[in-house]
Amino acid sequence: MLNLTVKNGPDLAERFQHLKKSLSLMLEWRRKTLSGKAGYHSEFSKIAALVGSIEITKDGALDGSASGWHPHAHIIVLHSERFDFKDLQAEWLKITGDSHVLKVLDAQHPDDPAQDFLEVFKYALKFSELSPSDNLEAYEVMRGKHLLFQAGLFRGVDVPEDLTDTPLDQLPYIELFYKYIDGSGYNLTETRDSEELEAAPEYLSCSGLQSKTYKPAISAIFDRN
């Protein structure tokens, strides 16, 4: 995981564009290095794939202290060659002209990488640490802006517009029915599986449901007592 920053500033729009241009230049140098273009040698060319999001924060936004807008990028990178940290810092300073601050971190969930992807993507929606007035300013400036980016092997990955889970057709499933009873909470009252529903005449006629009821071993779930 890689975090890239630029120097704080009072103008959010200017700082955001500065970060975006710096990221674009970094990707351009990486691309030209990989293509063997003369005069280019980028440490970022060791990255085989990357996907990231831009987070907007403001130092001192809540306590009233000296503050400045601080856009920065959180990136997941896939690489097989070890980075030279000092070379990364020097190159990022050359790209931005005002910042050499970056972090290289190990993945926090190597056995469940989806957790690390979720951690990175959440920053594009994280504005809770801003004051109400700063939230409004951030909304006005950032409205319609792209906060996610990708390159390398992740480029062109088809991400559906609806990221909610969608049921897959023709797979078995189980229906669980609960009833809320005052003083007891939610009680599991009926369980039916898909094979039983499809075999029942009322499933075809849609005239009603009269399938066999199974008594659950645990009579109450989500007990509020």
Image (cartoon, rainbow, N blue to C red):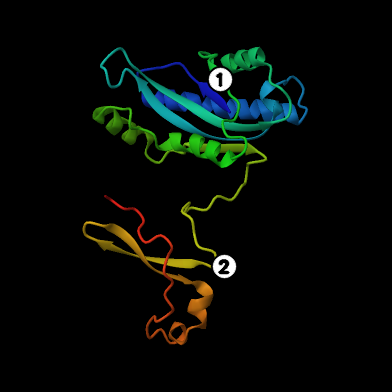
- The image shows residue 93, relative to residue 44, as above or below, that is above
- Image location of residue 213, percent across then percent down: 42, 75
Cα–Cα span, label 1 and label 2 = 44 Å
Secondary element type, mark 2: loop
Amino acid tagged 2: Leu
Residue drawn 30% across the image and 31% down it: 135
Residue drawn 56% across the image and 42% down it: 114
- Image location of residue 159, percent across then percent down: 55, 50
- The image shows residue 206, relative to residue 6, as above or below, that is below
Secondary element type, mark 1: strand
The residue at which mark 2 appears reads as 171
- Image location of residue 31, percent across then percent down: 69, 31
Q: Which mark is residue 29?
A: none
Residue drawn 41% across the image and 84% down it: 206
Amino acid tagged 1: Lys
- Image location of residue 190, percent across then percent down: 39, 70
Q: Quadrant of the N terminus?
A: top right
The residue at which mark 1 appears reads as 103
Judge depth for marks 1 and 2 and give the one in front: 2
> Quick one: 43 or 144, which is closer to the camera?
43
Instruction: Give the mark nearest the N terminus, 1 or 2.
Output: 1
**Image side of residue 31 versus residue 23, left or right:** right
Write down the quadrant of residue 82 in the picture: top right
| Disc 2 crowd, CA 10 A, few/some/many (<14, 14-19, 20+) | few
